[in-house]
Amino acid sequence: MVLVLALTFAAFGLDVPASLAIMWKGAFSDKVAIARTLVRATPLCLAGLGIVVAWRAGMYNIGGEGQYVLGGIGGAFCAKFLSSFMPSVLSIFILISGIICGALFGALAGWLYVKRGVQVVISTILLNFLALLTLEWTLRGPLQESKKQTFVTDTLPNEVMLMRFDSGTDLHSGVFIALIATVLIWVFLRYTIPGFHLRVVGDSPDAARANKLPVGAIQIRAMAISGGLCGLAGSVDYVGLTGRLADGYSQNWGFIAIPVALLGGLTPIGTLGSATYFGALFAGSEVLKRSTPIGNSVVPAVQGFAVLAYIAILWALNRKTQRRFD
Amino acid sequence: MPPEPRTEALIQVRAVSKSYGAVRALDNVSVDFLSGEIHAVLGENGAGKSTLMGILSGFVSPDQGDILFDGSPLPTGRPIEIRQLGVKMVHQHFMLVPQFLVSENLALGEITGNLTPLSLAELSKLATGKGTELGWNVDLQKIVLELPVGAQQRIEILKALAGDSRVLILDEPTAVLSPDEIRDLFGVLRKLRHQGIAVILIAHKLSEIMAVADRVTVLRKGELIATSLIGDTNEVQLAEWMVGDVPEFAKDGERSFGEVLVKAEKLSVNDDRGVKVIDSVDFEILAGQIFGLGGVDGNGQIELAEALAGVRDYDGVLTLPDNVAYIPQDRQTDGLALGLSVAENLMLSGVPSECKWGLFIRPALVRDYAQRMIAEYEIKVGKETDTAKSLSGGNQQKIVVARNLAQNPDLIIAVNPTRGLDIRATDYVHRRLREAAERGAAVLLISTDLDELSALADETKYLQSGGINDQFLVANA
């Protein structure tokens, strides 16, 4: 991966060792840098897990972005209309509301596929636009801040926000939510019967049907879990990091979750690792962009190369195993 | 009656062989095809019909042997040259672009790769001319997918006949047609015969062959069994040629059967297209009995099995025991999740109670269970965590068998359970099914392999045209 990074820098005409050093410093050198990495890794990990669940069920969910945004909206509605609740309870309600909104949005795409034959790839891409437009509308309507001057929500009071570990960093307890979710999804896929059935449907819907599994219900359920995780990512960022929604609320976390999940080999533990890697890339490049004229454009380039490298490795492995059978 | 028979054959196939891996698809086959004659090539699935037609049309290259066309060697393996010689093929699955107009589809075969302006009327003229000649009205402005299947087939035939044609090969042309459409097609084939074209018809419905063919060639397991004028043979003889000697089914007097476990009354089942393929059948299977259902492929076997297995809707009354095991015909798609491990595939029809705790799976117990099953059912596999994909066909089938028999089912439905397996694996599957019956299970063995039925079944009946008969083939059913 460092090699891919070095080659990308070289392609951009940057000083490779110096750039690598800046990236490293920005991502890992001190507690501020590490916090930066982890804060960015958190939504990537949660949404990445969502992608893993859907794709393992054979549902190619591209709608992580929309489900993330819906999670944020759900959280903001909760904060607005339940604001009289105790702060600690309210934050939990915000998270749950984010999960439910994302899950319903994901399940909608699953339902459209099972009942109406609409391809998940198509419907989830289109639902992304729907979610972004919904965000714009709510910011101009029911969720607009009290003074009605700008298109943002009210900022959450500090007591409602997730616990911070150090006043000098953004690191919030959402990082533990991501860790717990990773373990839960790992157990779910590997050691539970519904998780097993989900993987059977993903590997062979025909075999699942011949063995009397309710294929459609399992596919919809997988999309609901997937959307719930992406929605959780959105509400964790809302109640942990930003404290408010604005037009640019999602910075493509839901999209980047797809390469994160792929690079993680569509496994929960791998996704945790690759989310950390991508989180470090973002953290490092944020520092790098201040010191070079190219800046942020390096990041998507590196992501692209990383995923292509992964696909190339898979392809090579596949060819090798196939040759064994010829 | 064919017009004055010619002595000189248009196509002479001489000692042609073709193997795929260890399977000999065609073994030293020689046959002549004459101009002005409808020549049916008959055989079961895997008999080598399609391979022979593939060779004649150039899509398959023979390993050995020669083919003469009009006295000179046929350029085997070169479909375009063969087509230019006038040897035309109508595939079973239409080679049409469904979203395109009829005229566009007809023009498709004539378009050459240059930049001249495209005139659909000009390019489809040859084909439409043929249509007029044959008495078919072809609406060029219709979109193909909106036409009924029979009309689509006409487009396919006209596309093939455009230009000079001397041989027309049709691969199972009646499989998708209604009786009226079949009659119409046969009328056209007779017209073509009168024009001196050699018509080669691949089929497996005997009544149709008797109705239209002048001459018939029967293949079985890659070998040429017989070639005969149609007047010199009959349906029963053709059936015997096709499947080999119908074995004597000795009634097994030693075993006694128990209660009635399966009872079907007026059972009807539709296929995926909604066509009724099982029409109001009645049968009973007793505990301990192996009930065989034979018959040529495509007579509703899979649909019947799926209805009994509870994965397809049916009409009528069906009494079944609670614990039903289903060994589907296609182990690669229906039987196994190939990307999952052997252990997981052993649990596909239900996680055994000993391996679960509520909704959780207990990995150590799964491993023990899988290892025990692997040993007991003699599955050759490195580790239980290997993927099912990495196993040979025989061992894959052993997983399906093991999984189904381990639950001690009261009814086992097996559809062609040994198709594609070698002798050892076949013996294995037979032994396991027999053991299950001796234990008291009812077994429904649906198989096109008569040897398998005679070896295993206590009672055998035959599926034909949606019904169940006592004989392999009932004429004009």
Image (cartoon, coloured by chain):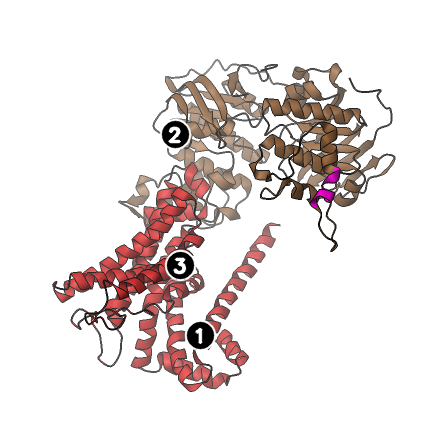
Chain colours: A red, B brown
Other residues around mark 1 within 10 Å, as few (<14) / some (14–19) / many (≥20): many
Disc 1: host chain: A
Q: Are marks 2 and 1 on the same chain?
A: no
Residue type marked 3:
Thr
- Identify the magenta region: B120-126
- SS at mark 1? helix
Camera-side residue: A284 or B387?
A284
Camera-side residue: B277 or B433?
B277
User: What residue is pinned by disc 1?
Assistant: A299
Camera-side residue: B92 or A143?
A143
Asked whether residue B244 is in view, the answer is no
Identify whether A174 is placed above or below A110: below
Determine the residue positioned at 75% across, 40% down: B62
Determine the residue positioned at 45% across, 30% down: B306
Proximity of marks 1 and 3: CB atoms separated by less than 8 Å:
no
Q: Nearer the viewer, mark 1 or mark 3?
A: 1
Disc 2: host chain: B
Q: Position of residue B351 (x, y in %)?
A: 35, 41
- SS at mark 2? strand
Residue B39: quarter of image: top right
Q: Position of residue B56 (x, y in %)?
A: 75, 37
Camera-side residue: A72 or B214?
A72
Q: Nearer the viewer, mark 2 or mark 1?
A: 1
Q: Quadrant of the N terminus of chain B?
A: top right
Can you tell which mark lies on residue B324?
A: 2
- SS at mark 3? loop
Proximity of marks 2 and 3: CB atoms separated by less than 8 Å:
no
